[in-house]
Amino acid sequence: MSALDILGVGVCLPGTDKPTEALSPAVTGTLGPGWLDVAAALPGRGYKRLPSACQYLLAATGNALADADGALSAVPAERRGVVVGTDNAGMALLDEQDRTIITQGAGAIAPLTAPYFAMSLFASRLATEHRVNGFTLTVNSPRTAALDALGAGARALAADRADVLVVGATEESLPAGEPGADGSDTGAVALVCARAGGPPPASSYGTVRVRDAFLAPGSRSGRALENAWRALTDDGDRPLQVDAIVDDSPVGEAVTAWLGNRGADLTLSPAGAGALTPMRHLAAALAARDGHDRIVVTAAAEGHVTFARLDASAHLSLNHPQQNGSR
């Protein structure tokens, strides 16, 4: 199974730029527009008028690359890749553009932001910023897009399309009046990744593997979930910590009930509109460096379910032996 070594973790979230605080109350609280100090987070020209979700993504990636200590710049541009997962990065911008066209005409749309009606532009802007010439992908599956981006990145590295990649997730709050606007995701997470398989790099946070499944709404069969779970777990596993980010849809309830029978240490968290929350949970688990293996799982009401397993214990014993006895 394809897997990723995580070399760097970066976040840009309301209230913090520290991955260890990604789930703190200050971050989960909702802050209004303009919470990011763009001049401080992205010094230089050409950033101020970018869409907010693009600013978040660039800032989170800058933090992750600094954390990865040159891992991306150490490889040629044609051996670098980018995969970005998002559901709502462009929704606020599209709403603004629609209102501008209605009230002032299309000629009043700012030229710098006009291309961002295409969701792929957020990943493309990141690729341009860091001279990524290997490949650039955007994943937009509801709720699971960020974890699916990790899976797509792992497959691309396994196919030798790149040596190092950035996997990111970015979201902007939905416009007022849209379903889910009151609890929509805002901010970005970025991970710098390399193909797993050899000796873990000294800077690695751990290894991540991803599997997905489809659970038809109303279905009582958990076979697809069982297959994905077995692909990520071993019979000898101690009870795993599982973070489930689910809603109250029939699919979310079915996944919750199924997980309750796994013998895992299960934590349930409400899912907001967007794909960022599962990635925030993964970033916080990576940054904790506590040696605990865990699974982050999320599900969409449409039936798509994605599991991401973090294998951290081997990396902790190799790179941080002073903590090894605390597990």
Image (cartoon, rainbow, N blue to C red):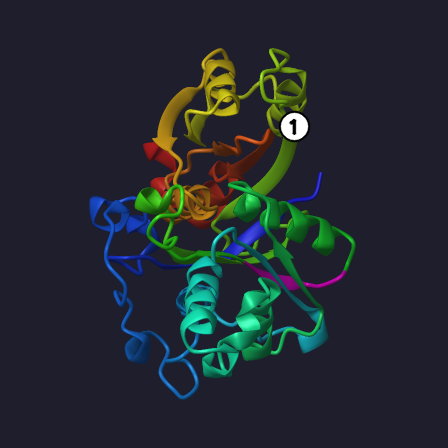
Give x and y (percent) for residue 22: 32, 49
Which residue is at a point 25% across and 65% down the rendered structure image?
Answer: 35
Which residue is at a point 46% across and 58% down the rendered structure image?
Answer: 91
> Relative to residue 121, is residue 159 drawn left or right?
right
Would you say residue 164 sits in the magenta stretch?
yes
Amino acid type, mark 1: Phe
Visible in this render: residue 189?
yes
> How many residues crowd mark 1 within 10 Å: few (<14), some (14–19), many (20+)?
some
Q: Farthest residue toward the right?
A: 159
Give the extent of the magenta segment.
161-167
Residue in the foreground of this view, choosing between 101 and 205: 101
- The image shows residue 283, relative to residue 95, as above or below, that is above
Give x and y (percent) for residue 54: 46, 68
- The quarter of the picture where the C terminus appears is top left
Visible in this render: residue 9?
no
Which residue is at a point 71% across and 63% down the rendered structure image?
Answer: 162
Q: Farthest residue toward the left?
A: 26
Give x and y (percent) for residue 25: 21, 44
- The quarter of the picture where the N terminus appears is top right
- Numbered disc 1: secondary structure: strand
- The image shows residue 238, relative to residue 303, as above or below, that is above
> Relative to residue 318, is residue 29 drawn left or right?
left
Q: Mark 1 — residue?
A: 214
